[in-house]
């Protein structure tokens, strides 16, 4: 084995990819976050280990809370009414607290959730054209495409075409209603319970409520669960 | 006390977008219908500067017909979009 290193590029194997390196300067808010975090740790407000554990937890929140919420609303009409009336309070019933642990939701000074119920006459879809507002306590971190201008700009302008790109065709006699989360309220879609799920338990129903069905870019289906594996062709 | 009530027709004011407003350009000058009243809160124009004790106003969810937002909208005539405004951004539709 030679002592050749990556730095001098004298080694013979090909590189099929561009070098992975930082591009540009760190964003202003990234610098601010690092400064406040380091000062907080130095001051003893929390430890580096506390912070790491929080980030690890935060990254894995995921859409399971939303799936439980939808499945409960499908089987329990009284819960659905409470959810539509006051989303944040109703979420506690399915074990999701928008205010605890701190940081999972919108700033705790103003936290509201509006549930947009799909009906045979209205199909809802959510977006944030300003940034990436998203019901994180219920769905976890948003998918990359949700934050990109190609989705944000286009779904308010050409919603049916964008939904079609996701494979979702909404009939012309069904209203497509876009919700642009430009202020502090957060929105989530309550999809319609699909055919073929008659008699299913709440737990089984939750398995077909995927992330995209609660953003509104997809419809749930009895034959597609959160653990299904896609195949092409 | 809210100036508008559910069902009112309102037009989004088209005033110069100085600094942070949260009022999207595509809604400026467009007319829609108030569908929900939201709690009074500090307006983004103040909160963006850290003025958390700043001016408080009622907020409203307004529903627009897509064809009123985009004159050449190609989807169904019944398609809509909803978004929120603080009271200062709305005036009665003429």
Image (cartoon, coloured by chain):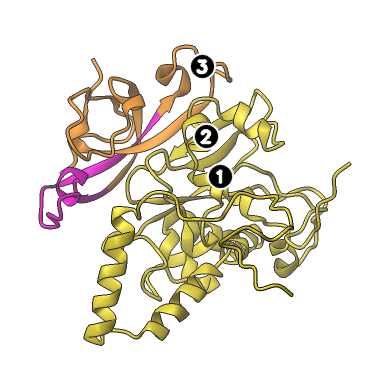
Chain colours: A yellow, B orange
* Quadrant of the snapshot with the C terminus of chain B: top left
Residue that mark 3 sits on: B73
Q: Residue at x 22, y 84 (%)?
A: A43
Compared across the picture, whether B12 is left or right of A83 comes to: left
Farthest right residue in view: A233
Q: Residue at x 35, y 28 (%)?
A: B33
**Where residue A151 sits: x, y (%)?**
53, 37
Helix, strand, or loop for circle 1? helix
- Foreground mark, 1 or 3? 1
In three-dimensional space, the C-alpha distance between marks 1 and 2, rounded to whole angstroms, equals: 8 Å
Q: Which residues are magenta?
A: B39-63
Q: Secondary structure at mark 3?
A: loop
- In the orientation shown, which residue stands out farthest toward the top? B72
- Which residue lies under the disc numbered 1? A145
Query: Is residue A208 found left or right of A26 in the rendered image?
Result: right
Q: CA distance from mark 2 to mark 3?
A: 18 Å
Q: Which mark is residue A150?
A: 2
- Residue A77 badge: none
Residue B19 visible from this viewpoint: yes
Front position in the image: A176 or A23: A23
């Amino acid at each position: 084995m030679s002592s050749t290193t990556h730095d001098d590029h004298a080694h013979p194997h090909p590189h099929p990819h561009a070098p992975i390196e930082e591009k540009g300067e760190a964003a202003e808010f990234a610098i601010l976050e690092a400064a406040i975090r380091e000062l907080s740790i130095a001051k003893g407000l929390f430890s580096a280990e506390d912070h790491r554990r929080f980030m690890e937890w935060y990254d894995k929140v995921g859409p399971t809370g939303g799936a439980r919420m939808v499945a409960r609303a499908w089987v329990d009409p009284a819960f659905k009414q409470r959810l539509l009336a006051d989303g944040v309070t109703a979420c506690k019933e399915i074990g999701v607290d928008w205010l605890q642990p701190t940081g999972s939701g919108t700033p705790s000074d103003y936290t509201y959730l509006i549930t947009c119920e799909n009906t045979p006459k209205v199909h809802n879809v959510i977006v944030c054209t300003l940034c990436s507002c998203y019901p994180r306590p219920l769905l976890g971190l948003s998918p990359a495409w949700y934050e990109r201008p190609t989705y944000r700009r286009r779904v308010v302008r050409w919603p049916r075409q964008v939904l079609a790109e996701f494979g979702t065709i909404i009939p012309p006699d069904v209203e497509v209603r876009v919700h642009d989360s430009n202020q502090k309220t957060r929105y989530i879609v309550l999809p319609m319970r699909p055919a073929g799920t008659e008699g299913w338990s709440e737990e089984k129903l939750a398995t077909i409520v995927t992330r995209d069905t609660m953003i509104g870019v997809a419809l749930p289906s009895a034959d597609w669960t959160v653990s299904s594996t896609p195949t092409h062709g | 006390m809210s100036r508008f009530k559910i069902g009112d027709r309102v037009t989004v004011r088209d005033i110069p977008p100085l600094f942070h407003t949260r009022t999207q350009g595509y809604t400026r000058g467009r007319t829609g219908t108030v569908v929900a009243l939201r709690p009074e809160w500090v307006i983004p124009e103040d909160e963006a500067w850290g003025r958390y004790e700043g001016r408080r106003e009622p907020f409203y969810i307004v529903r627009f017909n897509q064809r009123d937002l985009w004159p050449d909208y190609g989807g169904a005539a019944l398609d809509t979009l909803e978004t929120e405004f603080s009271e200062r951004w709305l005036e009665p539709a003429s």
